[in-house]
Structures are given as C-alpha cells and as structure tokens.
Image: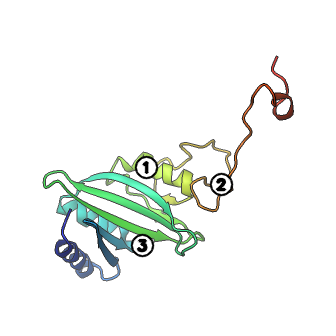
Amino acid sequence: MPDATELELTAQELHGADGAAILDTEFHRGRAVLIAHRDHIRPVLEHLHRKGYRFLASLHGVDYYPEEPRLGVLYEMLDMERVDRISVKVRLHTEDPRIVSVVDLFPTANVQEREVYDMFGVVFEGHPDLRRILMPEDYEGHPQRRDFPVGGEPILFTYNEAQNYGQWQ
C-alpha cells in the first residue's frame, strides 16, 4: 500500500494533469483510496497504469443507500513489481449511472463490468458486450441494490407443489 504521503503525491500528480479528476483521498487502516470524478476515470486509471499499477485485481459495485450519489464503482489496482495496491472510487447518481468502460485497458474488466451492470444497473459505455451475466436477460431490476425487494420465488416441495407450479407428472 502506498503510505498517506505517497497517496497525496499521486493525487497531486493527477490534479496537476487535470484539476477536476480527483475529488478527494482516503487513507484508512492502511488502505489508500483515490476518489475520482466519473468523467475523468479513464485518465486516472491510465495514469496509474503508467505508474506501474497494471493489474486490475477487482472491479466491483457498491450501493451507498440512502446517500446520494448512491452507486459506487471501485477499482482495485495492483503493482505486481512493488507489490503495492491502490483503490480508485467513483460515485454515480441513480438517475444517470453511466461510466466509461476500461475493458481495452484492462481485459479482466470485461466480466467484472458485466457483473456490476447486472447487479447494480451501472452502464459501462463502450463495453464490447454489455449484457446480463448472472441473471436472465428478461429479469427486471438489479438484485444487489439495497432497495431491491427482499423475498424470492417459492421453493417447490412435495407439500406445496399443487399451489406453486402444478403437479409434476
């Protein structure tokens, strides 16, 4: 992990290249996080890629309900030579949950972006094959959002099969 000083230096480098790219930094429990503006995520990740963070270890979604902007996308970057890790966080409003895809920069983002799209409804613009990956194509809603109704489909047992699906032959 970069220490707090290195995190701030990295944020200053990015701020010098594009003043609106980095909104804030967080350093908590040894975890370094850059909070980036969604419109500048691509240049931020490209800068980190040039610095040695060439491995996208994880890309995942978060729902900060009831806060707004509510949705988040976290990029966990790894420098394999220095064994160093840094996170980049982007917050998105639910009215316009769009962000640029980074599949061409990090091929491992392909499946991970599809999962965030499927579970949280974040649209990755420019993704080569953005479609559901875990849920059926005709499924409505995004199950990992915190306002998604809890419940589910009834489970078929012998005592309730007549009420649910009809009797099996």
CA gap, disc 3 to disc 2?
A: 25 Å
Image quadrant in which the N terminus is located: bottom left
Q: Give me the residue at 42% from left, 71% from top.
A: 38
The residues tagged by marks 1 and 3 sit, at their Cα atoms, a distance apart of 20 Å
Q: Residue at x 52, y 50 (%)?
A: 130
Give amino acid for label 3: Asp
**Residue 162 sits in quarter:** top right
Quarter of the figure that contains the C terminus: top right
Which residue is found at the position 36% from the left and 72% from the top? 35
At label 1, counting other C-alpha atoms closer than 10 Å, the crowd grade (few under 14, some 14-19, many 20 or more) is: some
Whichever of labels 1 and 3 marks the residue nearer the N terminus, that label is: 3
The residue closer to the viewer here, 119 or 169, is 169
Q: Position of residue 96 (x, y in %)?
A: 56, 70
Left of 96 or right of it: where is 37? left
Residue type at mark 2 is: Gly
User: Is 70 on the left-hand or right-hand side of 49?
Assistant: right
Taking the view exactly as shown, the residue that stands out farthest to the top is: 169
Decide which of 46, 60 is in the foreground and name it.
60
Q: Find numbered disc 3 in the image and state the secondary structure of the residue it sits on.
A: helix
Image disc number at residue 39: 3
Q: Quadrant of residue 66?
A: bottom right
